Image (cartoon, rainbow, N blue to C red):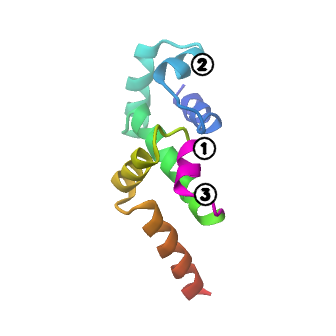
Amino acid sequence: MHQRIKQYIKQHIRENITLDDIATGLNASKKTLNPAFKKEYGVTITQFIRQTKVETAKELLIASNLSLLEIAELLSFSTATYFVKTFKKVTGVTPNHFRKHFISKSLLDD
């Protein structure tokens, strides 16, 4: 079941995913989703969604010239401010810092 939850999240990462969506999408009970997932991965489904959105944002920051607002909208964050706050909470740096640091570091590595 936990693999199916991860798969669902990855397929719908650009949406505003809720536990109700996952339960409906997998035809499962909402009550049983989180305990099984947390036992397997050590994080709640909501934490995993947040981490996956940030990982996707990192890829977009590196591989595209999309603005922070465009990335926030693409990944269904309510606002660009909330996106920046969430990104910083997960990674310890702002999206702009991540983009600049990654690009300058990769140029130095060449």
Q: Main secondary structure of the magenta part?
A: helix
Q: Which residue is at the front of the view, 24 or 3?
A: 24
Query: Which residue is label 2 attached to?
Result: 26
Q: Secondary structure at mark 3?
A: helix
- In primary-sequence order, the first of circles 2 and 1 is 2
| 92 sits left or right of 17 in the view | left
Query: Which residue is label 3 attached to?
Result: 60
Whole-number angstrom distance, CA of label 2 to CA of label 3: 28 Å
| 20 sits left or right of 85 in the view | right
Magenta segment boundaries in residue numbering? 64-73
Q: Position of residue 1 (x, y in %)?
A: 54, 25
Q: Position of residue 59 (x, y in %)?
A: 59, 58
Q: Name the disc covering residue 74, or none.
A: 1
Q: Secondary structure at mark 1?
A: helix
Type of amino acid at the residue the image marks with label 1: Leu
| 92 sits left or right of 1 in the view | left
Which-is-in-front pick, marks 2 and 1?
A: 1
- In primary-sequence order, the first of circles 3 and 1 is 3
Q: Are marks 2 and 1 in contact (CB under 8 Å)?
A: no
**Residue located 54% across and 20% down the image:** 21
Q: Secondary structure at mark 2?
A: helix
| 89 sits left or right of 28 in the view | left
Please determine whether, in this image, residue 100 is positioned above or below residue 74: below
Type of amino acid at the residue the image marks with label 2: Leu
